[in-house]
Image (spheres, grey):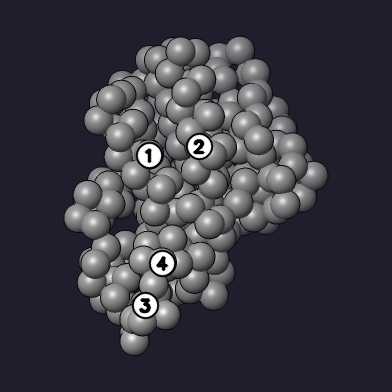
């Protein structure tokens, strides 16, 4: 599945509402990589989730299949809310920042701002969220938001790869999956990627930590770029 990936490849960690860092990445990476993979969590926490989705819509139109957008748990929660009227499960984990980014400046005049946000959510943003992939896999790479379940390493379900959480991935004694696993989701407090021989975490705190950079991995050369 998903083996139509041309080298070199750029894999980018969690964005979390930071449009300035995203736009810097989208300016540089198309000139470096044939395929650009984002690992999800585009929204919440940072102040510019609406602008992030705008930028990704524009990049999708320009780059086509060169741009592969994976789904993160925050993106899934937002889609659940705007498309299915389910509770906004990430509201207390940065979701309020997403709501604010969509409200007009005179938001104090809106009686029910969260419901206004849901009903006025742009169609093109919803379609972007609906088109996110759960993972991308080749013979040598598994790219997903949450990594893989060490107890069920063959599981490729959204519950595992998008919404799961596996701190044991950072235990060197935990067995890998015979290919490189690249993921985000787990904030690295030192603002540098976690690097092991068979797994790499690229969530370096963009939108979550003060001055957290957006980090990209360039394969096959194993080179890292950070956008601040």
Cα–Cα span, label 1 and label 4: 21 Å
Image coordinates of residue 158 in percent, x first then y, are: 38, 55
2 vs 4, front mark: 4
Q: Is residue 188 left or right of residue 115?
A: right
Q: Earlier in the sequence, mark 3 or mark 1?
A: 1
Image coordinates of residue 92 in percent, x first then y, are: 54, 75
Tell me the element at label 1.
helix
Q: Earlier in the sequence, mark 2 or mark 1?
A: 2
**Position of the N terminus by quadrant:** top left
Cα–Cα span, label 3 and label 4: 15 Å
Q: Quadrant of residue 203?
A: top right
Quickly name the residue at label 3: 114
Cα–Cα span, label 3 and label 2: 26 Å
3 vs 4, front mark: 4
Q: Earlier in the sequence, mark 1 or mark 4?
A: 1
Tell me the element at label 4.
loop
Tell me the element at label 2.
helix
Image coordinates of residue 180 in percent, x first then y, are: 57, 29
Q: Earlier in the sequence, mark 3 or mark 4?
A: 4
**62, 71: nearer the viewer:** 62
Image coordinates of residue 84 in percent, x first then y, are: 24, 71
Q: Earlier in the sequence, mark 2 or mark 4?
A: 2
Quickly name the residue at label 1: 55
**195, 118: nearer the viewer:** 118
**90, 97: nearer the viewer:** 97
Determine whether label 3 and label 1 are within 8 Å by CB: no
Quickly name the residue at label 4: 105
Neighbour tally class for label 1: few under 14, some 14-19, many 20 plus, Cα within 10 Å: some
73 vs 119: above or below: above
> Residue 22: which numbered mark, if any?
2
């Amino acid at each position: 599945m998903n083996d139509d990936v041309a080298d070199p490849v750029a894999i980018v960690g969690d964005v979390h509402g930071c449009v300035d860092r995203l736009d810097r990445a989208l300016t540089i990476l198309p000139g470096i990589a044939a395929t650009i993979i984002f690992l999800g969590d585009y929204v919440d926490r940072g102040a510019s989730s609406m602008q992030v989705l705008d930028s990704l819509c524009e990049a999708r139109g320009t780059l086509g299949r060169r741009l592969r957008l994976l789904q993160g748990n925050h993106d899934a929660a937002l889609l659940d809310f705007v498309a299915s009227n389910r509770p906004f499960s990430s509201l207390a984990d940065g979701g309020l920042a997403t709501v604010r980014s969509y409200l007009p400046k005179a938001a104090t005049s809106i009686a029910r701002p969260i419901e206004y946000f849901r009903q006025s959510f742009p169609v093109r943003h919803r379609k972007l969220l609906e088109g996110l992939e759960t993972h991308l896999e080749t013979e040598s790479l598994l790219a997903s938001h949450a990594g893989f379940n060490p107890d069920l390493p063959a599981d490729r379900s959204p519950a595992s790869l998008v919404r799961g959480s596996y701190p044991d991935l950072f235990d060197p004694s935990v067995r890998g999956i015979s290919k490189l696993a690249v993921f985000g989701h787990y904030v690295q407090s030192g603002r540098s990627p976690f690097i092991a021989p068979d797994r790499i975490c690229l969530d370096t705190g963009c939108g979550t930590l003060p001055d957290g950079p957006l980090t990209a991995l360039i394969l096959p050369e194993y080179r890292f770029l950070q956008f601040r």
